[in-house]
Amino acid sequence: MLNIAVLSDIHGNYVALQKCLDYAVNIGIDTFIFLGDYLGELAYPQKTMDILYSVKEKYKCFFIKGNKEDYWINYEREPKGWNEYDSTTGCLYYTYQNLTEKDLQFFKSLSFKEELEFDGLLPITICHGSPRKANEKLLPDNENTFLIMENNPSDYILCGHTHIQSKIEHNGKIVLNAGSVGVPMHSNGKAQFMILKGMQNMWDYEFVSLEYHIEDVIADLYSSGLNKKAPYWCKVSEHLLRTGEISHGTVLARAMTICKEKFGACNWPNIPEECWEQAVKDLKGLKHNEQI
């Protein structure tokens, strides 16, 4: 039997990443699939990259580009619109400033999807969002998702992006969402990934949830100064890490609504901090909407 660890949406949570990798290696896994969004919300991004490079050297690995990687690549081409001290773009700017040339070249080398085949097993498609584009969601009970599945050449699609572990079946085809290692939704604060199990020409799976030292990750927001660079974004990160509830996208949408109501229009990333402040105050009354 072939066991493969499938990890997505690390978002710079190197503590959770190491926990998931240690678990996988300890049960004998030596093949890894990474589905993108390696950095983005949390402090000390180079620690995450160093772990990924180390795994890449030691084991058989497949890497896909997420929508976050496109942020860094596009900003390098046109560096404008982000501010060092700003809840909307402060985390993006901080992460970009901590990237090396090696990191950028690595991201540029990645495709947004790949078709993989393992001996004696059905082919699988790996992607971040969908096989069409990195920032498209594959959602349960969704006609667009079903259409994508029908048009995909392989019967299995592995994805992330929604930060929610899930299985979607349609007309004999299957989508498996690995969830998020770094900032998962509805996880009670646990890191999440998936083990893909192949035997007798078929694939099975196991969703894994692991406890880890969340408070160490939150402490990094303060020791790095990231909490000052993106104050309200980091408040959302802190809440999400501890509870697994209320995404950044939900609070961003609320902040943009407040901005539009107050100023007549709102264009990302020009969202005043006062709008973020009010959106965070409303946080307990918000429900999960979308993940960015």
Image (cartoon, grey):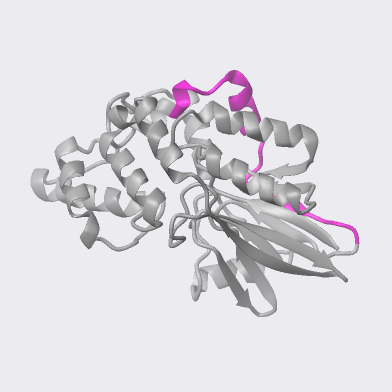
Residue 222 visible from this viewpoint = yes
Please count the marks in the image: 0
Which residue appears at 68% of the width and 45% of the height?
Answer: 22
Which residue appears at 58% of the width and 50% of the height?
Answer: 8
Residue 34 visible from this viewpoint = no
Residue 120 place in picture, x, y as percent:
90, 64
Q: On the rendered image, what quadrant is the N terminus found in? A: bottom right
Residue 42: quarter of image: top left
Residue 62: quarter of image: top right
Residue 227: quarter of image: top left
Residue 139 place in picture, x, y as percent:
50, 67
Outermost residue to the right? 120
Please check the rendered image and state whether residue 157 is part of the magenta-colored stretch, yes or no: no
Residue 153 sits above or below residue 267 on the image: below
Outermost residue to the bottom? 171
Residue 54 place in picture, x, y as percent:
71, 31
Residue 274 place in picture, x, y as percent:
14, 39
Residue 73 sits above or below residue 112 on the image: above
Which residue appears at 34% of the width and 61% of the height?
Answer: 288
Please check the rendered image and state whether residue 101 is part of the magenta-colored stretch, yes or no: yes
Would you say 37 lies left or right of 270 here?
right
Would you say 185 lies left or right of 289 here?
right
Would you say 221 lies left or right of 267 here?
right
Q: Which range of residues does the magenta coloring cover? A: 95-119
Which residue is at the front of the view, 224 or 270? 224
Which residue appears at 46% of the width and 37% of the height?
Answer: 40
Which residue is at the front of the view, 143 or 116? 116
